[in-house]
């Protein structure tokens, strides 16, 4: 008569443990595949913005900036109080105010100009595009009939004086 055990041992002594570890590791593998995208988003240039919660062009400007590597903290509280607190004259105002790298960004300033400001690091309060010129980022596209009005991005000194930082003087359309 041959003795057979009542149960059979696993093929290798630790295969059950390995299987559990593999199953436990699957969520980590998925996270590793997704994490680089999240890290890129989280490591974009941080920018904080104050805007009206109902302003569509502010949302469009934020989308333009995010597409160019900025990551936002958004305050839907309006921007008049923060603009005054930061010392920007009312005549240079627009519909949203942002802070990035210690600089104020007012209105529909193109992302490329914000990048240039951060590279150049001038002694200044920041950049502004006063008003809401059609054709500037957030004020562009088909909803505006693809119209492009000329406008200037102004560098604002700490004393409130300005000089042209960059001009966008495409032929004005009607």
Image (cartoon, grey):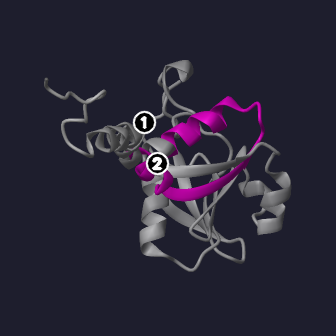
Quadrant in the picture for residue 29: top left
**View extreme (right): residue:** 81
Q: Residue furthest left?
A: 1
Residue 47 belongs to the span the image colors magenta: yes
82 in magenta: no
* Residue 49 is at least partly visible in this image: yes
Q: Which contiguous range is marked in magenta?
A: 37-65
- Residue found at x 26% / y 40%: 15
- Could you tell me residue 119's position as x and y percent? 42, 70
Indicate the position of residue 30 as horizontal and vertical percent values: 37, 38
Q: Secondary structure at mark 1?
A: loop
Residue at the bottom extreme, as displayed = 123
Marks 1 and 2 sit apart, C-alpha to C-alpha, by 36 Å
Q: Position of residue 163 (x, y in %)?
A: 56, 67
Q: Earlier in the sequence, mark 1 or mark 2?
A: 2
Q: Is residue 168 visible?
A: no
Which disc number belongs to residue 41? 2
| Cβ atoms at labels 1 and 2 below 8 Å apart | no
Left or right: 40, with 48 as reference point: left
Q: Which residue is mark 1?
A: 171
């Amino acid at each position: 008569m041959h003795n057979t055990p009542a149960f059979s041992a696993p093929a290798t002594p630790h295969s059950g443990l390995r299987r559990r570890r593999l199953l436990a590791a699957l969520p980590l593998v998925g996270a590793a595949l997704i994490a680089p995208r999240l890290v890129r988003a989280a490591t974009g240039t941080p920018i904080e913005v104050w805007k009206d919660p109902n302003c569509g062009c502010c949302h469009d400007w934020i989308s333009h900036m995010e597409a160019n590597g900025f990551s936002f903290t958004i305050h839907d509280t309006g921007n008049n109080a923060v603009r005054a607190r930061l010392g920007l004259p009312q005549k240079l105002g627009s519909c949203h105010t942002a802070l990035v790298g210690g600089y104020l960004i007012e209105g529909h300033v193109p992302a490329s100009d914000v990048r240039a400001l951060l590279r150049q690091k001038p002694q200044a309060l920041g950049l502004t595009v006063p008003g809401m010129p059609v054709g500037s980022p957030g004020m562009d596209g088909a909803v505006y009939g693809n119209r492009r009005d000329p406008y200037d991005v102004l560098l604002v000194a700490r004393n409130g004086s300005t000089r042209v930082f960059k001009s966008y003087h495409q032929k004005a359309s009607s």
